[in-house]
Image (spheres, rainbow, N blue to C red):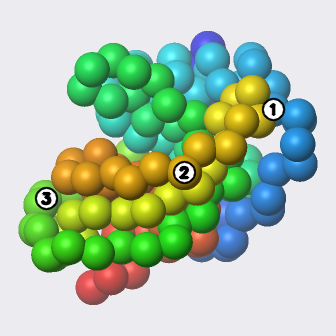
Amino acid sequence: MILQLIKYENNLLHKKCKKIKQNILDKRLLKNMFDTLLNYRAIGLAAPQIGISLRLFIINSFDSRKQIFCNPKIFKTYGVYKEFCEGCLSIPKLFYQMKRKEIILIEYFDEKWKVHNLQIKGFLARVVLHENDHLNGKLFLDYF
């Protein structure tokens, strides 16, 4: 099912999201989030963008690997700043050149509540940083 996206003027997008308690993830919600993501031909989608204040986002990477990030913690960003044009489903038709560090260290839980500690580089790191910003009530417009 395609979920309705909320737009930048909605207050929920400007608030920090709540941590997810272990084993409360609804498989139907995850499926609907991926359906929505694919419908909009996007790469990432955060729960607050569909009106749910939980620390959850999903990514459909270029190799068609679906990733679920529950309660992510970014421990470190490093490397050089790279500039890239970013857009956001919650801010349609608006794009900005964003500078973000190229490497991150992150810890998160997957849908089976297995913990992962990863170093993520390049474009995927940028997507994770963008989606993680949503969980902290921050939109890319807030950087300007």
- Distance, label 1 to label 2, CA atoms, is 20 Å
Lower sequence index among marks 3 and 2:
3
Q: Which mark is residue 117?
A: 2
The amino acid type of the residue labelled 2 equals Asn
Q: Quadrant of the C terminus?
A: bottom left
In the displayed structure, would residue 65 be above or below residue 130?
above
Residue 29: where, in percent of width, then height? 72, 25
- Distance, label 1 to label 3, CA atoms, is 32 Å
Q: Residue at x 33, y 82 (%)?
A: 143
Residue 127: where, in percent of width, then height? 34, 50
Residue 118: where, in percent of width, then height? 46, 50
The amino acid type of the residue labelled 3 equals Cys
Query: For the residue labelled by badge 2, is the local secondary structure a helix, a strand or a loop?
Result: strand
The amino acid type of the residue labelled 1 equals Leu
Can residue 81 be seen at all in this image of the molecule? Answer: yes
Q: Nearer the viewer, residue 135 or 5?
A: 135
Lower sequence index among marks 1 and 3:
1
Can residue 129 be seen at all in this image of the molecule? Answer: no
User: Are the two marked residues, 3 and 2, in contact with CB atoms closer than 8 angstroms?
Assistant: no
Q: Residue at x 81, y 50 (%)?
A: 20
Question: Mark 3 — residue?
Answer: 85
* Residue density around tag 3, few if under 14, some if 14–19, many if 20 or more, within 10 Å: few
* Residue density around tag 2, few if under 14, some if 14–19, many if 20 or more, within 10 Å: some
Residue 18 horizontal side relative to residue 116, left or right: right
Between marks 1 and 3 in the image, the one whose residue lies nearer the viewer: 1
Residue 104 quadrant: bottom left
- Distance, label 3 to label 2, CA atoms, is 27 Å
Query: For the residue labelled by badge 3, is the local secondary structure a helix, a strand or a loop?
Result: strand
Q: Which mark is residue 25?
A: 1
